[in-house]
Amino acid sequence: MKKTLMAVIILIIAFSSCCFAADNNSVKSGILSYLGTTESEFQIALDDLRKSVAPLIPTDDSHLEEWEDYDMFEGFLSSLVKNRRIVKFYDSLLSMQMALRAKQVDEIVLPEAVVMYIVNNNPTQYEILFSLNMMPSTISFGFKKGNVELQKEFNSAISAMRKDGTLMSLEEKYINQLGASEPAKAKFQEFKGAKTIKVAVTGDLPPIDFIAADGTPTGYNTAILSEIGKRIKKNIRLISVESGGRSAALASERVDVVFWYRNRDGLKVPKKLQDKNLKGAMKDAVDGVILSEPYYTWDTDLVVGRAQ
C-alpha cells in the first residue's frame, strides 16, 4: 500500500526544512493509522528524509520561483517552512477529531472530499489550512493473499463499472453533489444459496466510507459494493472495524475484503529532487494482502485546523 499521506508530508517537510536549524518550532499533525508501518517508523523516516534533502532547498521564498515546480509549494510553504511535523496516528476519524478539539494535535490531514464533507457539516469547528497536491491517491479493495478468485471477480466488476459509467455516476451522487447531506443508504440484493462476502467498513472517510447516525454503513463505498454484489451475484455483508484494525480483521478471516487507501504510483517529485531516493522509506503493502484495481481517485489532501 502506497503511503500517500506519509509521502506527501515527508516531501513537504523535507522541502521546507532549510530553516529548521534556526527554528525548532514543531506542529503536531494527526493522521489515520497506516497499515504496514508504525508511528515511530513513520516519524524516523520523515525526519531522516527531511535532513537528507534540506541542503537542496532554497533558503527563502524569492528563490523558489527559480524551481520548475514552484506551483507545488505556493499554497503551503509559508505554513511549513519553520515547523517540523510530529505525526500522531489515530485508529478512527472520531478519535482524531476529538484530539484536534482538545488541542492534542494542531492539525489533521484528510482527503479533500472528506474535509469538504466535515467542514460543510461543521463550519464553525474546522478551518482548512492548506492543501497537499503532490501525490494522487486511490482506494482499492484488499484481499487476503491467495484469494485470487475473489480479486479477479472484483476487478472484472470494477472494469465493467468504469466502462459503462457506473463508477462516475455513483461518485457524482455520493461525493461530488452531496454537500452536507447524509448519503443515501445503498440496497443490497440477496442471492439465495450464494456465498456471502464479508467486507470491513470503518466510517472514517465520510462520505466515502461512512456510517450513518443509526449505525448503518452507507456512503460511496457501500454503493460500489452493492453494485459489485449484483454483478458477481454474491451476497455482501458489512462489518464495522476500526481503520487501524483492517489488516488484522483480514488476516484472521473475520472479513474477506477491506478498503485499502492510498494505493497509487505517481509521486510528484520536483525535478531538482528526482535523483533522491524519496520513496525509500515507504512500505508498499502489508505482507499477505493483494489488491484490486483502484475504483476511486483523489488528487488533493487538505490539512485542517480547529476554527478559532
Image: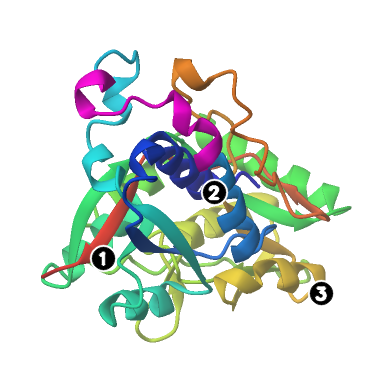
In the picture, the quarter occupied by the C terminus is bottom left
7, 236: nearer the viewer? 7
**88 left or right of 18?**
right
Q: Residues within 10 Å of mark 1 (few under 14, many from 20)?
A: some
Instruction: Tell me the element at label 1.
Output: helix
Amino acid on which the number 3 mark rests in the picture: Ser
138 sits left or right of 68 in the view: right
Q: Is residue 207 left or right of residue 55?
A: left
Q: Please check the rendered image and state whether residue 60 is part of the magenta-colored stretch, yes or no.
A: yes
The residue wearing badge 1 is 118
* Lateral position of residue 281 relative to residue 186, left or right: right
Disc 1/disc 2 C-alpha distance (Å)? 28 Å
Q: Secondary structure at mark 3?
A: loop
* Magenta span includes 176: no
In this view, the residue in front, 131 or 42, is 42
**Would you name the residue on which mark 3 appears?**
252
Lower position in the chain sequence, tag 2 or tag 3? 2
The answer to whether residue 63 is above or below residue 165 is: above
Mark 2, Cα crowd under 10 Å, few <14 / some 14-19 / many 20+, is: many
